[in-house]
Image (cartoon, rainbow, N blue to C red):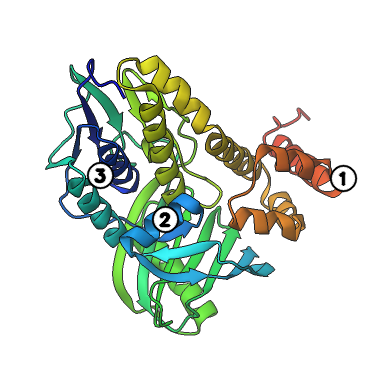
Amino acid sequence: MGIEGLTVISIGGLGVSGATLAYLLAREGFKVEAFDVARGYKKACGDALTLKPFTEEIARATRSVVTLVTRYIIAVNGEVVQDLSLKPPPWAIVDKALLVSRLREMAEAEGAELKAGSWPGPAGGRLSVDARGPLADPVKDAVFLYRVYSKAEWEPDTVYLDFNVRDRGVYWVFPADGEGRLVNIGAGFEGVWSGREVEMRIARLHKTLLGSTLEPVDRRGAPMQLFAPLRLYHEGVFKVGEAGGFLLRTGGEGNRPGMLSALHLARAIASAGLEDESRILAYYRLYSAGLADEVRVSKILLSIVRRSSTREASRLLKSLPPSFWERFVRAQVTSTYLIRLLIRPSVAFGVARALLSYSALRAPPQAS
C-alpha cells in the first residue's frame, strides 16, 4: 500500500464508526490520528446491533454483548401484527459505551493516535474522514429519540417495536441486561422535542405493556436525521456512519451501518492506497453499494408512510406479510425485495391507496 503522498489519515469522531475505522486502518499499518470532543462515550438509544459476520466479530472482540434477541413483537398503533421467533438470533443488545471504549483501546494498541478535542477538519498531507454524530451539523428534518433505562421485569431475549402512525412516531422496549430486570424503553415522534413530553408517553406504555410504573435509572436523548443525504465524500472529506447518511430510517438502526461503512472505507483505502482519492472513492462506492441500497429503501418506505393519511398508513403496515417483518429484523429489505413485494396486488393496492390519501389530504379546496 503506497503512503508516499498523503501520510496521515485524520478521523473526526470516535463513536462506533470512527473507532471501528481507526482500528481497521491502524491494523493495516496506516498512520491514523482520530479526534473526539469526549474522552468517554455515552449516547442515547442505540443498543441494538444486527448480527452479520463483521459486526458479530467486533461484538465478540469487544466482549460487549449483553444479551441475544430471538423474539420480535411488532405492533402498529399498539396492536400486535407479528410475533416472530427467529434463530439464530438476528440481533444482539450491546453495551455500546463498552463497545466503543474497547474499539478505541484496540485502535490505540494497533498504533492509532487518539486525541481529545475538536477535529480540525481537512488539512494538508492528511486524508480526512468525518465520522461525527448527528450533533456535528445543524439538525434538519429530524426526530428526537429519547430513551429511559427503567427497572422492570422483561424477557431478556425479547424486543417490542410499535410503529405508531397515529402518534407519528415509534415506541420500543429492549432488554437492557441479561437477567430480565432492566429495560431500555423509548420513543421518538415527529415535532416533539421535549424529553418531558416523550417520557410521559413512555410512562404510559410502561404501565400498559409492562404493568408497572416507570422507575428511571438513566435518561438520554438525541436527534435522528430523517432524510440526510447519503454522501460518501464531500468537499475533500470522506464520510462514514451518520455523517455519511448511513442510517436505516425505518428502525433507526445506526450501529451496523456505521460499522459496515467504516469497513467498506477501510477496504477501499487498502485497495487504492493513499495517493489517489478518486480511486479510493470508486472502491468505496463499490464496496458500500449494498449498504447504500438498504439506506435508500429505508428512506422510500419512511417517505410512503409519512406521505399517507394515518388510516391508510396504518392499513398498509398491517397488511405487510410476515416475510417483510422477518427481512426487516434481519436487515434484508433491499430494492430487489421491495420490487418483488410491490408486485403483490394487495401491497401495490395498499401503497397506491396510501399515496392517494396524501394527495387528497393536500388537495386545494374546491370553490363553491
Q: Look at label 1 and name its amino acid.
A: Pro
Residue 165 seen in the current view? no
Q: Earlier in the sequence, mark 1 or mark 3?
A: 3
The x and y percentages for residue 165 are 61, 55
- In terms of secondary structure, where does tag 1 sit? helix
Q: Residue furthest front?
A: 1
Residue 90 seen in the current view? yes
Q: Name the residue under label 3.
A: 14
What residue sits 30% from the left and 55% below the top? 43
Q: Which-is-in-front pick, marks 2 and 3? A: 2
Q: Mark 2 points at which residue?
A: 57
Q: Pick the quarter of the image with the C terminus.
A: top right
Q: Specify whether 363 is left or right of 174.
A: right
Q: Which-is-in-front pick, marks 1 and 3? A: 3
**Up/down of 99 relative to 216, above or below:** above
Q: Look at label 3 and name its amino acid.
A: Leu
Q: Look at label 2 and name its amino acid.
A: Glu
Q: Distance between the residues labelled 1 and 3?
A: 46 Å
Q: Which of marks 2 and 3 is nearer the N terminus?
A: 3
Q: Mark 1 points at which residue?
A: 345
> Label 1 neighbourhood size at 10 Å, few (<14), some (14-19), many (20+)?
few
